Image: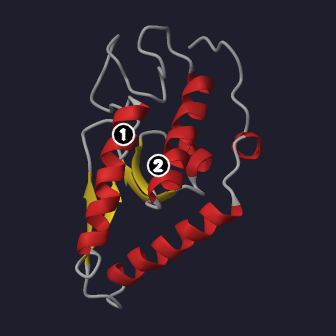
Amino acid sequence: MIFKRKLPIPKEIKEQYPLTAELSQVKARRDKEIADVFTGKSDRMVLIIGPCSADREDAVLEYCERLAKLQEAVSDKLVLIPRVYTNKPRTTGDGYKGLLHQPDPRKTSDMLEGVIAIRRLHTNVLANTGLPTADEMLYPDNYRYLSDLLSYVAVG
């Protein structure tokens, strides 16, 4: 494998693209709601809802804004987590592997720009909707770039 450049460590990316104190508090509140469901302290159900993959920020934000309105309507019964999966784990070879690998589908792969793009996407969803997200981690090290943003992680 040939490397074009070394990726910054997660701490550096988080410092360059920080989560505000206010958004950290919003996420902590939602994480508690989710934990309360999983530990039986709440009778509500958790639903992780969203498309197969997320690659266009405008479409993801529009969908998540609709989901936030729905969350208000069903908050007594459900805790909704937007599914914002930024990898395509079953794509092999030369196909599009998702936002992490190729943030601009018209350009070549760029993992650094991808890490920045997915961090920005998850941050914008939280900032615009108050809903922290779910993502699928194909590579365990990627989680550290998003650990302060994700409320649910699927292992792909």
Return the residue found at the far bottom.
41
> Horizontal and vertical percent for residue 62?
34, 42
The vertical placement of 11 against 47, above or below, is above
Give the residue at x 57% y 49%.
Answer: 146
Name the residue that disc number 2 marks: 125
Callout 1–callout 2 Cβ contact below 8 Å: yes
Real-space Cα separation, disc 1 to disc 2, in angstroms: 8 Å
Q: Answer few, some or many: residues within 10 Å of disc 1's Cα (few below 14, many 20 plus, some between 14 and 19).
A: many
Residue, x 61% and y 33% (percent of image)?
116
In the rendered image, is residue 79 in sight? Answer: no
Asked where in the image residue 53 lies, by quadrant, the reply is top left
N-terminal-most mark, 1 or 2 = 1
- Which percent across, then down, holds residue 16? 75, 40
In the displayed structure image, the side of residue 125 where residue 146 appears, left or right: right
Quadrant in which the C terminus appears: top left
Work out which quarter of the rendered image holds the N terminus and state it.
Answer: top right
Q: Position of residue 94 (x, y in %)?
A: 35, 10
Kind of residue sitting beneath label 1: Val
Give above or below for 2 relative to 54.
Answer: above
Residue located beneath label 1 in the image: 60
